[in-house]
Amino acid sequence: ILFEKAQNKFVYTQEKGFEIELVVRTRIKIYKKEGYDWANKEVRYYLESNLKEKVLFSEAVTYNLVDGKIEKTKLKSDGEFDEVINKYWGQKKITMPNVKEGSIIEYEYTLHSPNIGSPKDWYFQSDIPVNHSEYINCVPEYFVFNTNVKGFIRPEIKIEKLNKSIKIDSKERVVNRMGVTNTNYSSEDIAYVETRTTYLAENMPAIKEEEFVNNVRNYTTSLEQELSMTNYPNSMPKTYSTDWAAVVRTIYEYEDFGPELNKTGYFEDDLKVVLTGLNTQQQKIDAILKFVKSAVKWNEYYGYSCNDGVRKAYKDKTGNIAEINLMLTAMLRYAGLNANPVLVSTRSNGISFFPNRTAFNYVIAAVENGDDMVLLDGSDIYSEPDVLPFRALNWLGRLIRKDGTSAAVDLMPKKPSLELNSMNYSINDKGEVSGKLRSQKTTHNAMIFRDEMKGFKEDVYLEKLENSNNKIEINEYSLQNEKEINLPVIETYSFVGNNLSESIGGKIYINPLLFLTRKQNPFKQENREYPVDYGFPFQDKYAVNIQIPDGYQVENLPQPMTLTMNGNVGVFRYLTKLVGNIVQVSVSNQINSSTVLSEDYAALKSYYQKMIEKQNEKIIITKI
């Protein structure tokens, strides 16, 4: 990106008052074919009637150097598209013409929005380098915004005060001496002070995706703003989202949020049947969660506000996140449990660094019992109590109680998700391996596995499994508890492999974990600016029994090892034992925190490197 310049300003009309106009001009150099996607630009706009936005592209040109001369190709109407994404959002898109390696493209677009409360976020960084990024924000004195600059690189900031004016038309009815009523029209200029803030960042490096990053945009140099107060002439100042308590009170009072929790008549008869004979809190939670998941299917829309309402969602058996989980909360309350909604920002929505209503885009349910809290989401068929979909595992949510109070809720799981692998196999004198594997997964590991399996036919899945595991041949495959989500999912199969060992000079070299061995360190960068975010703590365990062939003995057996990282954030254990002609190997890797801070990255990288080196040590078997 050679330059990207934006001006965000307030425009006034007599009919609509102040609205926002954002004008963005961009120039990009295309060096390689891999960069052709940058010749497409998409701008989303809101469709809801009272906040409907408009987008207009202009001055879109592709420049090429042909025989020493600059050739200009302008965008034509067939390169511009207007799409409806869903009932809330539309999208204007352009595809620049005549793009080649070496092209420079340039375009301008204007976004006109009545939503003065939440100007569009501005990203100074991108996933390609940015030479010059400039954002000019022009705000009349009638508005006060909370602003926050995120990221590790700070732009230069310049603030100016400018005198401005707007023309206000007025009319008054006048009765003259003859008793005749006339309407007099007049206009006057209203002076005000505008704050013009310029943010400038130059020579910004590309922001790069790395392994185990929550949402890279949380760490991208960017500007976010939200209206905190209006102070119009001849009016009392009005404050908006000044703190999280005020934010959640505002949301709770929305017609499509708080009042939906009080509607119960539509489900009472059905729920009475579900609750028959249930006495404990856990029994009621399990039964109600299961009932909601079977009664209403998620329509793939996020949001903490109901669209058609809980009654209609229940009747139609489909609803958005709010309709499902506010319904779930109401049912839990009806069952006598202390249940309340929890506002959430999904991982894709990012983290907001100051209180604002757009920080959240999701809602779940919580049941409190003293100091204990159980988190629930009825939108995912594989969710369990305290096992939320991965999309919702995003730092902190905000609990809203009936009395209007609120509290931060840690969404990150504390209990490790397990993967237990038990493998028994034998090696013949040719180095061929045959054996059996039993793999058991719990909580989030089980949820992720079940979700991945949902789209596969068994034969397609097995072919993929064989190809990814050194071309093994699989038979006697079985899958247990695929739909019994309160139980671990268990995968069992027999396997044969001809590529799992090496025979050199009459000796057989074999990696004890075979195709389950981690080969590469996922952390390759020298330094890392972002936390490592696994989403949930986990423990991977391997219990392996290896039968060596008759007439052979073990010449070399990897030595036991215990490795810890930063006060047991990570613990790796590797044990080996020889019992007759059976080699027993026990391996465990446990990460006890959902998140590892960037200052601990070097220790984590070293931990993984030592663990991988140990896992890749081979047993050497030789003839007696």
Image (spheres, rainbow, N blue to C red):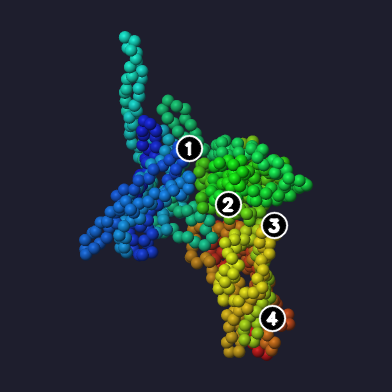
Q: Is residue 288 left or right of residue 452?
A: right
Which residue bears the numbered disc 1?
Answer: 228
Q: What amino acid type is highlighted by mark number 4?
A: Gln
Q: Which mark is residue 26?
A: none
What is the number of callouts on the image? Answer: 4
State yes or no: discs 3 and 1 in contact (Cβ < 8 Å): no
Q: What amino acid type is highlighted by mark number 3?
A: Asn
Q: Residue at x 43, y 35 (%)?
A: 143
Mark 3, Cα crowd under 10 Å, few <14 / some 14-19 / many 20+, is some
Task: Please tell me which residue lies in front, 357 or 291.
Answer: 291
Task: Please tell me which residue lies in front, 489 or 192.
Answer: 489
Q: What amino acid type is highlighted by mark number 1?
A: Ser
Query: Which image quarter: residue 127?
Result: bottom left
What secondary structure is marked by label 1? strand
Which residue bears the numbered disc 2?
Answer: 392
The percent position of residue 93, horizontal first and vertical second, equals: 38, 52
Q: Which mark is residue 486?
A: 3
Q: Which mark is residue 547?
A: 4
- Position of the N terminus, as image quadrant, is bottom left
Q: Earlier in the sequence, mark 2 or mark 1?
A: 1
